[in-house]
Amino acid sequence: MADVVPKPHTPAQGVAAQTQDDLTPMALALHAASEAAARGEVPVGAVVTDAAGAILAIAGNRTEADCDASAHAELLALRAAAAARGSPRLENCDLWVTLEPCPMCATAAALFRVRRVLFGAYDPKGGGVEHGPRIFAATLNLQRPEVVGGLREREAAALLRDFFGKRR
């Protein structure tokens, strides 16, 4: 799992040639999504940051490589961040993802107790935050993270469109 970064670090570590815009959590998530696509995975990337904005984990989808239908970028990043923090709860942490989380990943974000979920492209067919079951709005859900959608939406949607366009 080389694409999962389990240790906390600041975005600037070891990345001298990139601009600050390339080091934002969403840019890092888009990069992880591009790497996933290069491996033949659906191009979704996720990043978990702490309250100060330090990167705790970065992951891209690995469902095919791991033969695991639950190996979504969000779950991989949340698990790695929790391991890095030594706690099953990620309070005051943010989940950045290139695609609106599916119901499984939205539920996981609630269970990990993230502060915010920030995503790129909306997913009218498979999303679980703004579409479908709207997990965070469910009356039984006691954890309701702040949600921000549409961040770098065009780029995130283009990755998905290009990936699936090549497979049709």
Image: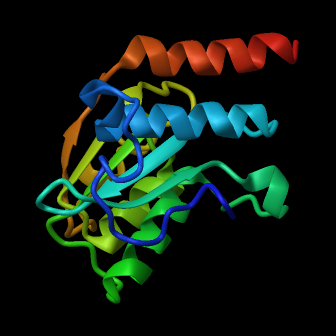
Question: As drawn, which residue projects farthest toward the front?
Answer: 16
Q: Is residue 135 at all visible to an observer of this figure? A: yes
Quarter that holds the C terminus: top right
Q: Residue at x 80, y 63 (%)?
A: 66
Q: Residue at x 77, y 63 (%)?
A: 68
Tally the numbered discs. 0
Q: Nearer the viewer, residue 87 or 125?
A: 87
Q: Nearer the viewer, residue 137 or 163?
A: 163
Instruction: Answer above or below: position of 114 versus 124.
Output: below
- Give the quadrant of residue 134: top left
Q: Is residue 119 at all visible to an observer of this figure? A: no
Q: Position of residue 46 (x, y in %)?
A: 46, 47
Q: Position of residue 118 (x, y in %)?
A: 28, 40
Q: Residue at x 44, y 43 (%)?
A: 128
- Determine whether, in the image, residue 123 is placed left or right of residue 114: right
Q: How is the image coloured?
A: rainbow
- Give the quadrant of residue 87: bottom left
Instruction: Answer above or below: position of 108 versus 18.
Output: below
Q: Position of residue 62 (x, y in %)?
A: 71, 53
Q: Residue at x 33, y 72 (%)?
A: 112
Q: Position of residue 123 (x, y in %)?
A: 49, 27
Quarter that holds the N terminus: bottom right
Instruction: Answer above or below: position of 23 versus 81.
Output: above
